[in-house]
Amino acid sequence: MFKNDKQYSTSIDFDFDAKHIWHPYTSMTHALPTFGVVAAQGTQLTLEDGRTLIDGTSSWWACVHGYGHPYILKAMEQQLHQLSHVMFGGITHAPAIDLSKKLINMTSESLTKVFLADSGSIAVEVALKMALQYWQGRQQNQKQHILTVKNGYHGDTFAAMSVCDPEGGMHSMFGDSVTPQLFAPAPQTLFGEPFISDDLTPIRQIIEQQHHTIAAMIIEPIMQGAGGMRFYSADYLAGLRALCDEFNILLILDEIATGFGRTGKLFAYEHANIEADILCLGKALTGGYISLAATLCSDEVAQGISDSPAGVFMHGPTFMGNPLACAAANASLDLINENQWQAQVRAIEAQLYTELSEAIHLPEVKDVRILGAVGVLEMTSRLDTAQLQQDFVDLGVWIRPFSNFIYLMPAYTITSSELTQLTNAMKKVAANISLYSPHNTLISHG
Ligand SMILES: *Cc1c(COP(=O)(O)O)cnc(C)c1O
C-alpha cells in the first residue's frame, strides 16, 4: 500500500533516545529496544531502514481508519491554519460544538453534557470527580468510595490508578498515596456464554453492606482491556446497571478502549442495552491522530454538581477542547457515521475466527479469545515483550505482546491479506514461544 517514493531522513539517534527519553513503562538505565518509525500510511509503518510493517495494534487501539487518511488530514490541515488552539475559558469554537453534538447524538439518550479533556486518564479523573461532586450536591458527602472489579484498567494518573487491578496495577508501588477503593472479583461469565447465576453475588454483597459510602461503580463494558484482555457477559453488565439503580450508585462506563465499534457495537454497552450515568471516551475518538478524550454525563449528574457547595465542576485543563484535536475527531466520527465500520469489524471478526481459533492447539496457548476487531492469544506464561516484538518485526508485522497476551487490534480498514499475514505471524511466534526465556520482569501494559 505504501509507496516508498519519498526520501525520509534516516538519522534517528537511537543512542540519545535510549539515554534520555522515557518510553512507556520502561527504565532509564536499562532501555528496552525501540524501532525508528519515519512514516505511516494505511495500515503500514515504515521503519528508518526502509522496511515496512503491517500494524496489528492500530497504535494502541486508536488508529481505526488507518494512518494518513486523506479526509482526516484535510480536516486537520484546514483547522491548523484557521485556529490550531485557543483557551476554552470564556471562549468557544465550532469544532468543539460540532464534536459535542455528534457525541451526544451517537451515545445513549440520557447523556447530554460533554467535558473535553486531553487524554483517557484525565477523562477518568473527570468522571470520578463528577461522581464525587454529584453526591456533595445531593447532600450525601459520605458517598466517597469508588467500586470496581478486578482486572480493570483505567489509566495511569492517581485516581485512575486507584481503580486499576490491585495486583496487576500499581497499587503496591505507591502505597498509601493511592486511594483505597472497593474491589469485587472480575466478572466470571464469559461473553456470549450462559450467565453464571451467582456471578453478581460478591459485588451485590459489597454494595448491600457499603452502598451508603459508594459514589460510583466504574467498569470497562464487555472488554477488560489492558488489565487482562477478557470479554465478559452482557448479562453481568445489565445486572450491574440494575444494582446501581437499586442502591443509588452512579455507573461510570469506561469506553476508552471499546468505543467506536471495536467490539462489534458502536459502544460496548449496547451489547447489554444499558445506559451509563457517566461515559469516558478516548483512544479512537480522533481516529488516533492526536490526543483527545471526552467525559459525558446526564442532566441529573450535571444538576447535582451545580447543587454542590462549589456550584461548578472543578476541572479545566489548559488544552481543554483543543480545536485541532476536535477537528480530527469530527472527521473521524464522520467516517464512523458512514457506517463502513460495521461490515469491516464483522469481516475482521469472522476472519479472526477462521485463522486464529486453531492456535488453541499450540502447547503454550492457554486460550484464544475473539470479539469484534480484537483477537487475543492468552499464553501460559509471562512473555518477553522485547524479544517478541523483535520476532514480529522480523516477520514484517508490528505486534506488541504484554503480560501473557499476544493480541491484534488492527485498523478497521485492514485488508484480508494483511490480516492473514498478522494471524500467521501470531501463530508462528506462539508456536515457537518455548524457545524464549520469559525473564522480563518489567511492568508492561503495552
Ligand atoms: C487506554 C485506556 C485508558 C487511559 O487512556 P490514556 O489516553 O492512555 O490516558 C483508560 N481506560 C481504558 C479502558 C483504556 O484502555
Image: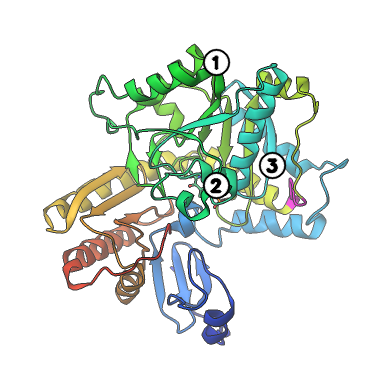
Residue 320 sits inside the magenta stretch: yes
For the question of whether residue 200 can be seen, the reply is: no
Three-letter code for the amino acid on which mark 2 is drawn = Asp
Mark 1 or mark 3, which is nearer the start of the sequence?
A: 3
Residue at the (52%, 80%) spot, across then down:
18
Q: Is residue 12 left or right of residue 349?
A: right
> Is the magenta region chiefly helix, strand or loop?
loop
Most foreground residue, 270 or 15 = 15
Most foreground residue, 412 or 13 = 13
> Residue furthest toward the front?
176
Q: Position of residue 97 (x, y in %)?
A: 75, 37
For the question of whether residue 348 can be seen, the reply is: yes
Q: Quadrant of residue 20?
A: bottom right
Rendered-image quadrant of the N terminus: bottom left
Residue placed under numbered mark 1 in the picture: 248
Residue placed under numbered mark 2 in the picture: 176
> Residue furthest toward the top?
246
Residue placed under numbered mark 3 in the picture: 116
Please state the extent of the stretch shown in magenta in the rendering. Answer: 318-323
Residue 229 is tagged as none
Residue at the (45%, 42%) spot, across then down:
341
Q: Is residue 103 left or right of residue 147?
A: right
